[in-house]
Image: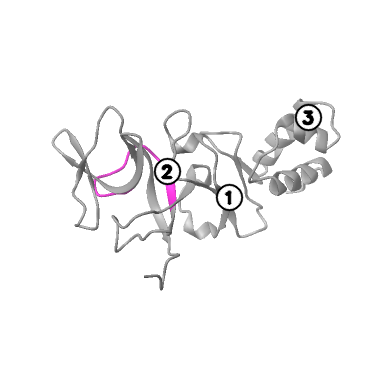
C-alpha cells in the first residue's frame, strides 16, 4: 500500500530509533512538523496500512512490519526485572529482534521475547535460548509459561493440583513450586524456542 512521503520519513525514523523510541515532540521536530497531532495521524495511518504495530501493554514501544518484507520485529524483555506495574511487559525492552513471521503463529501485537536463564527447563530450554512468547494470562495445564511469582520472573510448566497452581521444572533436580496466589502472574505462553547455546558446556 502506497505511503505518503511524510509516512515514509516517519517509518524510517521509527525504525532508526526502535530500540529507544522518540517522543511525539521529538518525532515532530525531526520531521519539521509543527503539530504533534499530524505525527499521531501518520502513526495511525501506518498502523492501518500494516506497517506499524504498537505494543498493547506499553504503546510507547512498537513493532515494524513491512508487508513487502518477510520479517517481523519483537521486543525482548529481561527476566530479572519487572516494570512499574509488577510485570516485565511495562518495562523497557532490552532489544528489538527481527524474526521470521513463520515463527509467530498468533497476532504479532501479542508477541514478545525473553532470554532464558538457568537450567531448570533442560533439556527443552537452555540458558541463553531465546523464547518467543504469546502474551496471555490464561494458560492450559502443562503449557510452558513466562510468569512472575513473589517478584521473581521464571519459565515453568503451568500445572494445577486442586485449588493450587504448581510450577514444574522439566529438570527434575528442581522441586515443584507452589505459586503464591497473591503475587503470581502469567505474562505469556512460550510458543517457540530459538536455540543459541549449542556446543557450549
Q: Residue furthest left?
A: 162
Q: Residues within 10 Å of mark 2 (few under 14, many from 20)?
A: few
Rendering coords of residue 98 (x, y %): 58, 56
Disc 2 + disc 3, Cβ < 8 Å: no
Q: Residue furthest front?
A: 201
Is residue 40 rendered to the left or right of residue 185?
right
Find disc 3 in the rendering and name its residue.
38
What residue appears at the point 24 percent right and 32 percent down from the top-left corner?
180
Is residue 60 rendered to the left or right of residue 188?
right
Q: Residues within 10 Å of mark 3 (few under 14, many from 20)?
A: some
Find disc 1 in the rendering and name its residue.
96
Residue 33 occupies which quadrant of the picture? top right
Label 1 vs label 3, nearer the camera: 1
Work out whether mark 1 precedes mark 2 in sequence or the reverse, and give the earlier one. Answer: 2
Residue 161 occupies which quadrant of the picture? top left
Disc 1 + disc 2, Cβ < 8 Å: no
**Magenta residues (range):** 132-144
What residue appears at the point 40 percent right and 70 percent down from the top-left corner?
200
Label 1 vs label 2, nearer the camera: 2
- The answer to whether 196 is drawn above or below residue 18 in the figure is below
Marks 1 and 3 sit apart, C-alpha to C-alpha, by 26 Å
Rendering coords of residue 155 (x, y %): 33, 48
**Is residue 154 within the magenta segment?**
no
Q: How many marks?
A: 3
Is residue 45 rendered to the left or right of residue 194?
right
Q: Residues within 10 Å of mark 1 (few under 14, many from 20)?
A: many
The residue tagged with tag 2: helix, strand or loop?
loop
Find disc 2 in the rendering and name its residue.
80
The residue tagged with tag 1: helix, strand or loop?
strand
- The answer to whether 176 is drawn above or below residue 164 in the figure is below
Q: Nearer the viewer, residue 11 or 126?
A: 126
Amino acid at each position: 500500500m502506497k505511503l505518503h512521503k511524510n509516512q515514509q520519513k516517519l517509518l524510517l525514523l521509527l525504525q532508526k530509533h526502535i530500540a529507544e523510541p522518540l517522543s511525539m515532540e521529538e518525532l515532530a521536530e525531526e520531521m519539521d512538523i509543527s503539530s504533534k497531532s499530524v505525527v499521531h495521524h501518520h502513526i495511525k495511518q501506518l498502523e492501518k496500512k500494516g506497517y506499524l504495530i504498537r505494543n498493547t501493554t506499553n504503546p510507547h514501544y512498537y513493532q515494524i512490519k513491512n508487508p513487502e518484507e518477510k520479517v517481523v520485529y519483537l521486543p525482548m524483555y529481561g527476566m530479572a526485572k519487572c516494570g512499574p506495574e509488577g510485570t516485565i511487559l511495562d518495562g523497557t525492552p532490552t532489544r528489538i529482534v527481527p524474526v521470521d513471521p513463520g515463527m509467530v503463529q498468533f497476532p504479532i501485537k501479542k508477541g514478545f521475547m525473553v532470554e532464558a536463564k538457568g537450567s531448570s527447563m533442560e533439556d527443552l530450554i537452555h540458558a541463553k535460548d531465546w523464547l518467543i512468547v504469546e502474551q496471555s494470562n490464561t494458560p492450559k495445564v502443562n503449557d510452558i509459561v513466562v510468569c512472575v511469582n513473589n517478584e521473581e520472573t521464571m519459565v515453568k510448566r503451568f500445572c494445577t493440583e486442586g485449588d493450587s497452581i504448581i510450577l514444574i521444572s522439566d529438570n527434575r533436580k528442581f522441586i515443584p513450586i507452589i505459586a503464591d496466589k497473591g503475587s503470581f502472574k502469567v505474562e505469556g505462553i512460550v510458543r517457540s524456542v530459538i536455540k543459541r547455546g549449542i556446543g557450549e558446556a
